[in-house]
Image (tube, grey):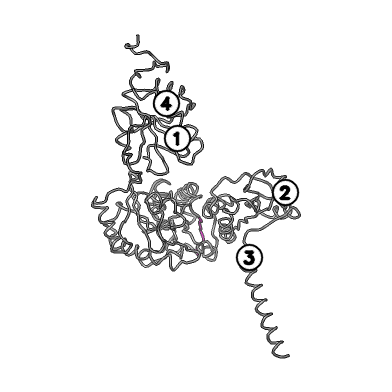
Amino acid sequence: MRDSFAGSSKMFRHVLLLGVLLRLALASDVLEYTDADFDVKIADHNVALVEFFAPWCGHCKRLAPEYEKAATALKNEDPAVPLIKVDCTANQDTCSKHGVSGYPTLKIFRNGEVAKDYSGPREADGIIKSMRTESGPSSRELKSASDLEKFMSGSEAVVVGYLSSAAGAVKDLYHKMADGLKEELRFAHTASDDILGELKDKIVIHRPKRLHNKFEPEHVVCDASETTDAAGLKQCVAEGVHGMVGHRTTANVANFKNPLLTVYYNVDYTKDPKGSNYWRNRILKLVSSQAEKLRNKLNFAVSSVSEFASELQEYGLGDTDNKKPVATIRDEKMRKYVMKDEFSVENLQKFVSDYLEGALEPYLKSEPIPEDDSSAVKVVVAKNFDQIVNNEDKDVLIEFYAPWCGHCKKLTPIYDELAEKLKNEPEITIAKMDATANDVPSTYDVRGFPTIYFAPKGDKKNPRTYNGAREVDDFIKYLAKESTNKLQGFDRNGKAVKNKTEL
């Protein structure tokens, strides 16, 4: 009997522990409101972001982990910014009241009322930055040492103006800079004698604890007395905020300047800060040992393999196994270089040296050059782009397409007929390129499919987007008008003309 009781008691404790662990696992920093309490609870917040969703929605499922990460970070802000969700399949009255017609719909509320639709990024870092901007002034005031400590306790770099009451001109510069960078960074200022100390009238970048290392200082001072405008101060902050080897994310990617060497591996400062710094510290050691040699010649960053999976595909590294880092360089002309050797500090050193000496061949993502070049529509790949499209002897009309694109498939017979009608024109080429399988030169802005450009001879650096109708006659009229030299078989209005031999 006693054994039975002991066994039951032990089982009960296991069940109880399992229940506690389950509740912890399911804990969420995203608040969930319903028809019954939405109007009352939303009014309690000065600023809040609300996601109206449906459980079956694929976009909502993809947003969920990013929304959760942002909610956790913004919960600890001062002031806190709540992230809220409403299940529209169970709370139709609230969703209907706020005009929700698709999922997910995100709206920013102020004091219980809709302020505007949220149109910012839908990944955690972007949501955090967008909502910080919405929640308060460009720079918040710190009145005590505990305020400063709390402000600096987050996972990102912050900027603090230690500005005494006498620092009038510097204050103006500081706040202008903060206004211009408030979506990128968090700013605070103080005039408290308890805080100023030796940093009095200085503007300081405090790097987050997760990125502290023995190779560079934990903070950088920008002396506003040495600059005369907000732009100079802004440049000092921009150059100092990431340190010698910055943590590059999809949210701050625009802040990293080329030429840039990026090392990709399993960077995750939330789940594995120690592991994330393992390789970063080794890269820091390399960079710090050659700081003067590398100054203004090459910038460095680390990035997450999973976060930049699509970028890695651009370098032909889409099949990386995530076990060892991989490294790439993109230069100021957007040329790409890939470290081909297995990653090690020694091989990274060689990769850097070869780049600086001009000994690396740029990586070009390209399909093979077609063996059969007899078709009326010329097939362009990255390797023959200069030969065909940048041929100064011919005007070129080029379609950038994707194999899966329905509009591209619809255009194919029309484009083929156009090429047949113009195949005897000696000074014009009709071409096409699979933009998913080949690098597209930066002068061609391809954001959707199909995208069509006209590249006139003599001005290949300034191709023109074709925005006209997509029937054969429409293309011919356009080319007859825009061609550098008159077409032989058509007048300038696109009407066919007879050859003399036919008269």
Q: 466 above or below 73?
A: above
Residue located at (38% from left, 63% from top): 324
Question: Quarter holding the N terminus?
Answer: bottom right
For disc 4, the marked residue is 418
**Where 367 sits versus 148, above or below?**
above
Q: Where is residue 444 in the image (x, y as percent from the top left)?
A: 39, 37
Q: Earlier in the sequence, mark 1 or mark 3?
A: 3
Instruction: Specify the label residue 94 is tagged with.
Output: 2
Q: Mark 3 points at which residue?
A: 26
Q: In the visual, does 161 lie left or right of 62?
A: left
Q: Mark 2 vs mark 1: which is more N-terminal?
A: 2
Q: Which residue appears at 68% of the width and 50% of the height?
A: 111
Amino acid on which disc 2 is placed? Thr
Q: What residue type is labelled 3?
A: Leu
Q: Toward the viewer: 446 or 317?
A: 317
Q: How far across and how far down the image is residue 25, in percent?
A: 61, 67
Q: How many labels does the image show?
A: 4
Spatial CA distance of label 1 from label 3 is 46 Å
Q: What element carries label 4?
A: helix
Work out how far the residue at label 2 is from the one at label 1, CA to CA, in angstroms. 41 Å
Q: Give the range drawn in magenta.
A: 187-194
Q: Which of marks 2 and 4 is in front?
A: 4
Question: Mark 2 vs mark 4: which is more N-terminal?
Answer: 2
Report the residue at 50% width, 66% height from top: 271
Query: Which residue sits furthest top?
Result: 503
Q: Which of marks 3 and 4 is nearer the N terminus?
A: 3
> Mark 3 falls on what kind of element?
helix
Residue type indicated by callout 1:
Thr
Residue at image coords 48%, 46%: 180
